[in-house]
Image: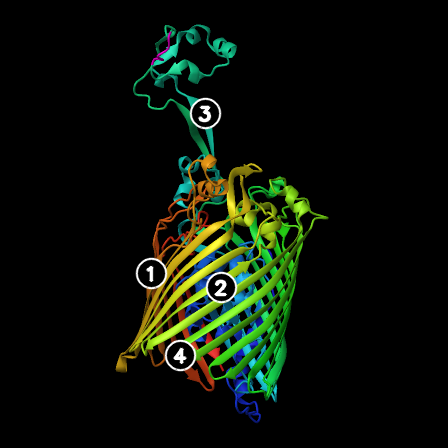
């Protein structure tokens, strides 16, 4: 597939010479700000289970997608959509329930609605990524009911760099991995600080250990009759009906005498005139022994497989249509004074890639494109303003204001032809006033606002044009006294969702009329949280956290009405849906004993009116399963355990060990009776068609990690085992068991100095055992496994 490329090679050549040039730059007088302290922020005060990946950790875990980068954190999985794309899935929740922000404001992308769309984040350029595994709805609204991910890139500097110019350049490539080039520059001139970065990454395709499709997809008898699995496998069995007369011991003599005329006269079939046993009727004299009877014939009638048609490729050793080309560039500038800063930045992101192994078997774009590979072309431009002021007032720590405008163009292509686009224009603003009245009291007061417009083109559009307007007022206060600390918070918000149907005709279905009648919806939301932490001993801290979080239905849950190839379903929203409410209790413990730290978390969430995409048990347009957005009470529970210990090996360096495990269940509160006449019909349909457990539920896993450091050497390795999923959901029929697997990764680096530059030579190897791994929570798990063994070698130069 062709794509427009930004020629960045001259930049790499120029940047190689920068360290030498920087040595000759005249040093400017240092600007010293006295009384400087880390500013208070809402995210800093928020309680709950958190994890942070700093720059050193990111060097060993970063990957093409945000989900892959964070998947080693306990409780966080990668909701994979192939090797080039994946969202973080926190405690089984993802998409519209996990808030993702970059440099303080939400990322305007459509990945939450359509998993094949990328999240416009470049993990290779991140300074730090923080994960809030508990609900953060008080600070960020309903889209954080399942947690929040914060990416910091330093786009808008908030402090003056230590040197007039500095940065890094990195080049890498290897076997079964993209070749990547990136750079970053940070500088200052007086009180003005600036930042520039760019990245380029490209791969023609990935190698895999075996066939791209799972074994059952190549077994026509295994998938015959399971329409959902047929579509997921993109394999369609062809069969013929047969009737074996020799299997039956008795036959109606009238049929032997008259043949087909007897069947036609009485409206009968062969099954009416051939029987395994002689019928016990009042007059059964017409039944005689079948002259064709053969006791060795075991099959009487049914369907016989004649051919298995693979609509999408099924090849060995290669992940079909897995090419990718990702590019990004950004620049920011700010003025930094004694009492704060103000700055602005612009970023540009483009990602062109193939959805691995997947073709659109049904499309309105034309018969000639129905087996064309699905490709994604995403472009995003984002402008951002950030300002913070530290007043002289003792009780007011700082006031921070942010604004961003984002224009994102997302195209779904069949080959190179447009099938569907889902574009967005988003304006958002956030204001925080952070207070510090006393030593024992800190707090945040704030408001945020967002206006999003979406529009689409193409014959396969599944959404009309929409507009979302929302705002929220929030407060979070934290108190501490001796061995006790706690926080309380509240938020009030309003969300308005509107669909424009002038150039869009909803697909026919149960909710077609409702979408036309109720295309203008408003929801009021309230969220609360409270946390109490106690430290009974120096080595032990324990606490309990309660949250009440509400989320309004998103536009796809309300107004979707067509084939949605990304989720392999004919998706239909329902504007009658209500906000969902999640009430969570979380118990957390931390033990610090010597050089060891142990974290144990247990959580339980009761969702009232949980929004889910439910199977109707029917298909539409031939093969596409017909699914509707519905609501039902749901319970989520789980455990997370993390143990880390550092060994001082004296002259042999330092060794850090890590052992972790996580487990989560997401299930319907009650399935009711097996008889729909004597039960809640909605519960009956949910459990019959979707199962007691959520389909694509992340599996239980446990792992171990080792990191050894000595002088210039750093070696890190991890081994993670994913157990087979025993809590299987349904897609009308039960989900197949894909089995468990173990992944082994290794990172090694050597660092040395040349003049004023630091050079790090590194090797990053993933899936060293070349295991065939099919994550149960991946949409494409039947079509492609994770990438096979990869080895990336590179050089990073910092100056």
Tag 1 residue: 702
Question: Residue 701 appears at what percent x and percent y?
Answer: 35, 58
Tag 4 residue: 751
Distance of mark 3 from mark 2, alpha carbons?
49 Å
**SS type, badge 4:** strand
**SS type, badge 3:** strand
Which disc number belongs to residue 66?
2
Image mark count: 4
Please report the residue visible at 54 percent of the width from the left and 75 percent of the height from the top. 444
| Label 2 crowd bin: few (<14), some (14–19), many (20+), radius 10 Å | many
Distance of mark 3 from mark 4, alpha carbons?
69 Å
In the rendered image, the vertical position of residue 232 relative to residue 158, given as above or below: above
Residue 690 appears in the figure: yes
- Queried whether the magenta region covers residue 225, the answer comes back as no
Provide the residue span drawn in magenta.
278-282
Q: Earlier in the sequence, mark 3 or mark 4?
A: 3
């Amino acid at each position: 597939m062709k794509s427009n490329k930004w020629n960045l090679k001259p930049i790499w050549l120029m940047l190689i010479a920068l360290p030498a040039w920087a040595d000759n730059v005249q040093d400017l007088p240092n600007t010293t700000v006295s009384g400087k302290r880390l500013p208070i922020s809402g995210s800093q005060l928020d309680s709950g289970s958190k994890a942070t990946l700093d720059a050193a950790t990111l060097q060993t875990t970063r990957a093409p997608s945000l989900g892959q980068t964070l998947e080693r954190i306990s409780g966080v999985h990668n909701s994979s959509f192939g090797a080039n794309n994946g969202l973080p899935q926190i405690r089984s929740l993802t998409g519209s329930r996990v808030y993702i922000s970059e440099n303080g404001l939400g990322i305007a992308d459509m990945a939450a609605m359509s998993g094949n769309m990328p999240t416009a984040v470049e993990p290779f350029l991140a300074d730090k990524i923080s994960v809030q595994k508990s609900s953060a709805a008080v600070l960020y609204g309903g889209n954080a009911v399942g947690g929040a991910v914060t990416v910091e890139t330093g786009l808008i500097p908030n402090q003056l760099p230590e040197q007039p110019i500095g940065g890094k350049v990195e080049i890498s490539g290897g076997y079964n991995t993209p070749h990547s080039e990136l750079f970053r520059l940070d500088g200052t001139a007086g009180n003005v600080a600036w930042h520039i970065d760019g990245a380029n990454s490209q791969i023609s395709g990935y190698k895999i250990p075996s066939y791209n499709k799972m074994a059952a997809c190549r077994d026509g008898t295994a998938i015959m009759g399971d329409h959902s699995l047929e579509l997921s496998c993109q394999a369609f069995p062809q069969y013929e009906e047969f009737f074996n007369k020799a299997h039956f011991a008795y036959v109606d003599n009238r049929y032997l005498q008259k043949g087909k005329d007897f069947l036609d006269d009485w409206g009968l079939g062969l099954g009416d005139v051939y029987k395994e046993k002689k019928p016990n009727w009042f007059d059964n004299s017409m039944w005689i022994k079948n002259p064709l009877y053969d006791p060795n014939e075991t099959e009487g009638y049914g369907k016989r497989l004649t051919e298995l048609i693979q609509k999408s490729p099924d090849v060995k050793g290669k992940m079909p249509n897995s090419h990718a080309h990702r590019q990004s560039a950004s620049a920011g500038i700010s003025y930094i004074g004694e009492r704060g800063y103000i700055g602005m930045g612009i970023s540009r992101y483009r990602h062109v890639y193939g959805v691995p192994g997947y073709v659109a078997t049904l499309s309105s774009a034309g018969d000639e494109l129905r087996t064309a590979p699905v490709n994604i072309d995403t472009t995003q431009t984002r402008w951002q303003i950030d300002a913070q002021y530290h007043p002289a007032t003792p009780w007011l720590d700082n006031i921070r204001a942010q604004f961003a405008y984002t224009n994102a163009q997302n195209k779904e292509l069949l080959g190179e032809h447009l099938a569907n686009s889902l574009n967005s224009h988003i304006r958002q603003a956030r204001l925080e006033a952070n207070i510090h009245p006393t030593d024992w009291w800190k707090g945040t007061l704030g408001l945020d606002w967002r206006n999003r417009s979406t529009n689409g083109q193409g014959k396969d559009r599944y959404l009309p044009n929409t507009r979302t307007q929302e705002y929220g007022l929030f407060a979070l206060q934290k108190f501490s006294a001796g061995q006790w600390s706690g926080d309380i918070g509240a938020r009030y918000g309003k969300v308005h969702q509107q669909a424009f149907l002038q150039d869009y005709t909803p697909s026919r279905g149960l909710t077609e009329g409702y979408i036309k009648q109720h295309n203008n919806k408003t929801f009021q939301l309230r969220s609360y949280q409270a946390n109490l932490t106690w430290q009974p001993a120096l080595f032990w801290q324990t606490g309990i956290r309660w949250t009440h979080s509400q989320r309004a239905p998103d536009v796809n849950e309300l107004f979707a009405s067509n084939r949605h190839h990304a989720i392999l379903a004919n998706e239909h929203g329902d504007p009658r849906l209500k906000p969902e409410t999640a009430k969570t209790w979380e118990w957390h413990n931390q033990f610090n004993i010597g050089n060891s730290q142990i974290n144990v978390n247990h959580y339980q969430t009761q969702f009232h009116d949980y929004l889910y995409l439910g199977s109707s048990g029917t298909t539409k347009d031939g093969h596409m399963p017909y699914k509707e957005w519905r609501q039902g009470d749901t319970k989520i529970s789980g455990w997370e355990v993390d143990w880390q210990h550092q060994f001082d090996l004296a002259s042999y360096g330092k060794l850090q060990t890590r052992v972790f495990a996580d487990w989560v269940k997401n299930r319907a509160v009650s399935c009711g009776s097996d008889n729909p006449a004597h039960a809640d019909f909605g519960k009956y349909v949910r459990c019959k068609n979707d199962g007691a457990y959520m389909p694509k539920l992340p599996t239980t896993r446990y792992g171990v990690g080792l990191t050894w450091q000595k002088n210039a050497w750093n070696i890190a390795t991890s081994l993670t085992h994913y157990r087979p999923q025993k809590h299987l959901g349904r897609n009308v029929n039960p989900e197949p068991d894909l089995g468990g697997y173990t992944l082994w990764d290794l990172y090694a680096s050597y660092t040395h100095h040349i003049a004023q530059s630091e050079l790090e030579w590194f090797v990053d190897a993933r899936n060293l055992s070349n295991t065939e791994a099919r994550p149960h929570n991946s949409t494409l798990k039947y079509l492609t496994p994770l990438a096979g063994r990869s080895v990336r070698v590179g050089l990073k130069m910092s100056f």
